[in-house]
Image (cartoon, grey):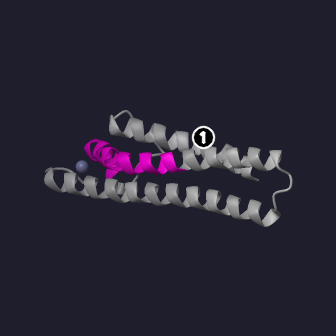
Amino acid sequence: MLLITGIVLVPAGLLMLWVAWASGRDRLQRNGTVGVRTRLTMECDAAWFAAQRAAASATAIGGAGALLGGIGAIVMAMVEASRPGLSFPFAMATWTLLALGAAGWSIAWALAGVGRGARAAEALCAQRPGCV
Ligand SMILES: [Zn+2]
């Protein structure tokens, strides 16, 4: 279970770090899957890029947490495999802390990024005549 958690969290963290990197450099084009997607950002190019830039640092923090949690889960899976005497409650506690901690951390920061991005988009469009 720890190994599977690690195998899920590591690529998820790497994906978030890549999105953060691309978002901070206006390299993330508007798409239907990742990024800050609100009514404003989906209709306005300036708002889209402003929102992704505003979200980038929070996305990076979330991705780093998922990556570290995933590496921790893989390390713990190897420790448990090498020491079969470890108790089941200990294994469950480790898994719960790592999986829920890393997942909760990355989701919370992703949502914080969306909030920052949405506010940046609103502020920008409000100042631009002709913007939605
Ligand atoms: Zn706009």
Magenta stretch, main secondary structure, is: helix
Residue 12 in sight in this render: yes
**What residue do we see at 44% from left, 56% from top?**
109
Query: Residue 69 location in percent, x, y?
Result: 59, 50
Query: Residue 41 location in percent, x, y?
Result: 34, 50
Q: Amino acid at mark 1?
A: Pro
The one of 131 and 99 positioned closer to us in this rendering: 99
Q: Is residue 80 left or right of residue 60?
A: right
Q: Is mark 1 within 8 Å of ligand 1?
A: no
SS for callout 1 = helix
Residue 29 in sight in this render: no
Could you say which quadrant of the image residue 23 lies in? top left
Q: Is residue 90 left or right of residue 113?
A: right
Q: Is residue 105 left or right of residue 123?
A: right
Say whether residue 46 is magenta: yes
Alpha-carbon neighbours of circle 1 within 10 Å: few (<14), some, or many (≥20)? some
**What residue do we see at 31% from left, 44% from top?**
53
Would you name the residue on which mark 1 appears? 11
* Quarter of the image that includes the C terminus: bottom left
The one of 55 and 1 positioned closer to us in this rendering: 1
Query: Residue 43 location in percent, x, y?
Result: 33, 48
Relative to residue 82, is residue 116 depicted above or below? below
Say whether residue 27 is magenta: no
Q: Is residue 10 left or right of residue 36?
A: right
Q: Residue furthest right?
A: 84
Q: Which residues are magenta?
A: 40-65
**What residue do we see at 45% from left, 40% from top?**
19
The one of 34 and 129 positioned closer to us in this rendering: 34
